[in-house]
Every structure is written in structure tokens, then in C-alpha cells.
Amino acid sequence: MRGEFELIARYFAPLAEAAPGAQGLLNDAAVFDPSRDDSLVLTIDTMVEGVHFLPDDPPGLIGRKLLRVNLSDLAAMGARAIGYLLAGAFPKDVDEAWIAAFAAGLAEDQEVFGVTLYGGDTVATPGPLTLSLTAFGEVPEGRALSRATAHAGDEVYVSGTIGDGVLGLDALRGGLRALDEDQRAALAARYRLPEPRLALGRKLVETGLATAALDVSDGLVADLGHIAAASAVAAEIEAGAVPLSAAARAALVSDAALLAALLTGGDDYELLFTVRPGRVGELAALAGRLDLPLTRIGRIGEGQGVRVLDAAGREMDLPGGGWSHF
Ligand SMILES: [Mg+2]
């Protein structure tokens, strides 16, 4: 395999071409000129082989997911995504084809999301392959979304559908045999390639519609718990109102016990946000403009913790769910 500098020149420098401040990755650091009146928004995520992905996962998809989970955090803050820094710790036995496919995946998603590499670092490791990505973006000063600003009386909304990520991982591990091949593939695709809701995040900032927001990565119930804890309020979810994809509905028909996994599984990367009751009428128009379902799933009240209600209005007993006290 080529040496470190040749690998960077061949596979990573092309990813930085659109960023003048990256200077072809030839300087010691990149230079970035923030826009006047904007705040920088920064986030980092790390993925470890054997923990966050498997040795035989396609390298292009690993690169794209690593970028997308970071962009989802920028979306949660309402930021416009701009660029990223990348660090890779590669075991000695990684081959050049792996790095080429990983970089090709990043190049593909740079086009999709309009972001550029600004810099990075590669090292050799005696441990597992480890990849860390720092993404940055901008939001008008003082306007970044927060999980700490929900109020009693707000309605709770979520974008897209919930549960596909956890079901997709199940399908990739050979589970969900009751589903047909297309349904299993649709769920697996949602697990491998989450869709960061950047356009929604920016619209929530522009319109001022969201009182609080975050992206669903830990699980719907736990993440609403984060909003409740940070905002010092209580939250309630109506399980029957949670939006599900056709494949997730089919999975639930085959095994009703999957409902708990859908509500708590995580890896959804949808935006969960709260809205004052007087403004919920504006959400239908926004959903139409974005061509993205925005669904009311519950409400915020006084108190603390998260309660999940079944169709009959009874409190559900969920692992890690129910009223948890922080
Ligand atoms: Mg997040």
C-alpha cells in the first residue's frame, strides 16, 4: 500500500478541493472565514469497528453514515452544514481498496449535502479501525435550536417515521423473517443510510416554530426524556400516534411486542421538536413544502420524566421508558 502522504493526496485531498481554506490539505491547518452575524455550530461522532459497524460492512456506506450522523446533529441545532474534519486510525491490515471505497462514499454524500472536507489526520493503530468526524455549520447568532427550551402546554412533533433504524439492524442480522425481501431491504437501507433533516432544521430556525429540538439517536422515549430533563418539564407520548413506515407496520403486525423496540431503539435520526399550540397550524404547510411528514405524537406538561400511553390511554411499561426521574 502507498504511504500516508500518497494516500492523503490520492483519496482525501480531492474531497477538500471545494474548500479554498483547506488549501489542498497541504498546510498545517485549514482556515475558515465565518459569516458575519452567524454562530459556528460544531459536533463530533466516532465509530469503532466491532462496536458501530462490522468488519464486512461496505466501506462507502460506513463513510456516508459517519458523515450523516454528524449532519443530523447539525440539523438538530438548525444549522446550515458547511464542512468537516476527519480522523482515521487504521489497522495495519486495512487495504487501499477499503480506503478508496470509503473516500468514494464520502465524495458521494459531499455532493448530496453540499459539504466539503477541511482537514484530517490518519494514524496506524494496533486496535480496531476507528473513524472520527467533526462537522461544522452556521446558524444565525442566538437562533440555534436547543433541547432545554420546551414549555408546559407545547405539542410534541417528530419528522419522518420512527423505528426503521432498529428494525433495519435486526433485518441485517437475519431477523424479521416474517417480512418480504423488499421490506427487509427498505429497513436495512434506513439503518445504513439515515437521512439528516437539515432542511427541516433550518426551516424551524427561520420560522421560529420549534420551542425545543434534538435528533433521535438514543431512542424516541429516551430522547424526549432528554428534552424533558433539560427543559425541566414532563412529556407524554401517545404510542398509537407515532408515525411508522409500511415495513415497520408490517413488522408490528407479525409481532406486536416489537412496539417497545420501535419506541426505544434509536438510530432514527429524525428531528423531535416541540411547538406552541397556537402555531401547530403552520406545520402542515411546512411539511408540504419539505415533502416530509411532521406528526404530532404527544405533549409537554408540568413535572418531570416521560410517560408513554397505549391506545386505551394506559401507561405502557417500557424498558428504560415510563416515568424516569433524572
Ligand atoms: Mg444528537
Image (cartoon, rainbow, N blue to C red):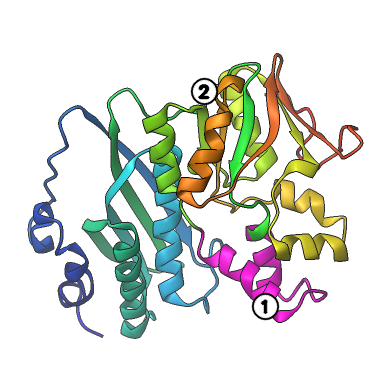
Answer above or below: position of 10 versus 192: below
Q: Position of residue 74 (x, y in %)?
A: 39, 43
In the rendered view of the protein, which quadrant contains the N terminus?
A: bottom left
Question: Which residue sits at x=74%, y=34%?
Answer: 237
Q: Please identify the quarter of the rendering in which residue 26 is found.
A: bottom left
Q: Nearer the viewer, residue 193 or 285?
A: 285
User: In this picture, which residue range is highlighted in magenta?
Assistant: 165-194
| Residue 98 marker | none
Q: Residue at x 91, y 32 (%)?
A: 314
Q: Residues within 10 Å of mark 2 (few under 14, many from 20)?
A: some
For this rendering, which residue is in front, 174 or 52?
174
Label 1 CA crowd tier, 10 Å (few <14, some 14–19, many 20+): few
Q: Is residue 204 above or below residue 1?
A: above
Residue at the spot 70% in from the left edge and 54% down from the top edge: 244
Place of residue 246 in the rendered image (x, y in percent of width and height, measured from the top left): 71, 63
Q: Residue at x 35, y 26 (%)?
A: 143
Say if residue 129 shows up in the picture.
no
**Residue occupied by mark 1:** 182
Residue placed under numbered mark 2 in the picture: 148
Three-letter amino acid code at the position of disc 2 = Ala
Task: Please check the rendered image and state whether residue 193 is part of the magenta-colored stretch, yes or no.
Answer: yes
Name which of mark 2 and mark 1 comes first in the sequence. 2
Q: Is residue 220 magenta?
A: no
Question: Magenta span: helix, strand or loop, mainly?
Answer: helix
> Label 2 to label 1, Cα distance in Å?
40 Å
Pointer 2 and pointer 1: residues touching (CB < 8 Å)? no
Q: Position of residue 5 (x, y in %)?
A: 15, 72
